[in-house]
Amino acid sequence: MSEPLPGPGLVITPEGLRGRTGRYEKRLSDLDGLFADAEAFAARLEREADRVIYHVDEFRPSTETGDLITGISTLSPGRVGAEFHMTRGHIHAKHDRTEIYHCLSGHGLMLMETLDGQTVVTELRPGVVAYVPPVHIHRSVNVGDEDLVTLFCYPADAGQDYEIIARSRGMRHHVVAEAGGWRLEENPGYVPR
Ligand SMILES: [Fe+2]
């Protein structure tokens, strides 16, 4: 009988995902145009353009239909003006591809939006799994005061379209701080699709 082969055995460590195939970082300077308060963004950019706002470790065995991409996203706490740190956000290039995010630590939101502008929010606390249905734009928002760490998993052939958010000048709602918590605020510049 032949010996079994070892699987990749992904392990979550404080440093990220052991067994990863890739990693990327987004610094403050990469997030130009994301936040509503341009003055507050410019002020922070002067002081900390190179600060890493979030990073992603991923295991991407292939991009074949039927395969899965698994990873860990770590989003730092903080605000630009009243708005909380968030990821760029995207819709999957293949619109019907879904995703789950399992919150490992921190306090955040999975902010989602349908193509006709309906906002959907799942609040993330440790243990919560957020399901991103087909054809939903999605981004993570850190509304807490520590790192928001989530494990995500999505089909390997999904792809990402980031421009869908830029074309509408943002998502329909901003997530802003209020009285120690958060609330949604209409994005006044939002362009319906
Ligand atoms: Fe996604």
Image (tube, helix red, strand yellow):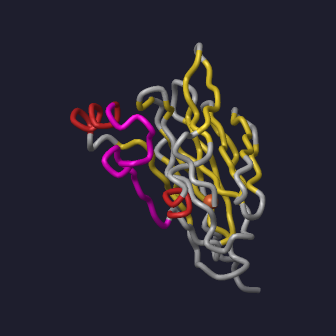
Quarter-wise, where is residue 80 in the image? top left
Q: Residue furthest bottom?
A: 1
Image quarter where the C terminus lies is: bottom right
**In the rendered view, would you say 130 is above or below 166?**
above
Q: Nearer the viewer, residue 186 or 179?
A: 186
**In the rendered view, would you say 140 is above or below 96?**
above
Left or right placement of residue 148 versus residue 40 in this view: right
How many marks overall?
0
Answer with the quadrant where ligand 1 appears in the image: bottom right
**In the rendered view, would you say 140 is above or below 69?**
above
Q: Residue furthest top?
A: 179
Pinpoint residue 1: horizontal percent, then vertical percent.
77, 86
Name the residue located 65 percent from the left edge and 76 percent from the top edge.
5
Magenta region: which residues?
21-39
Name the residue located 74 percent from the left edge and 49 percent from the top edge.
118
Pinpoint residue 130: horizontal percent, then vertical percent.
74, 46
Pinpoint residue 47: horizontal percent, then vertical percent.
23, 32
Task: Confirm whether the magenta stretch covers residue 114.
Answer: no
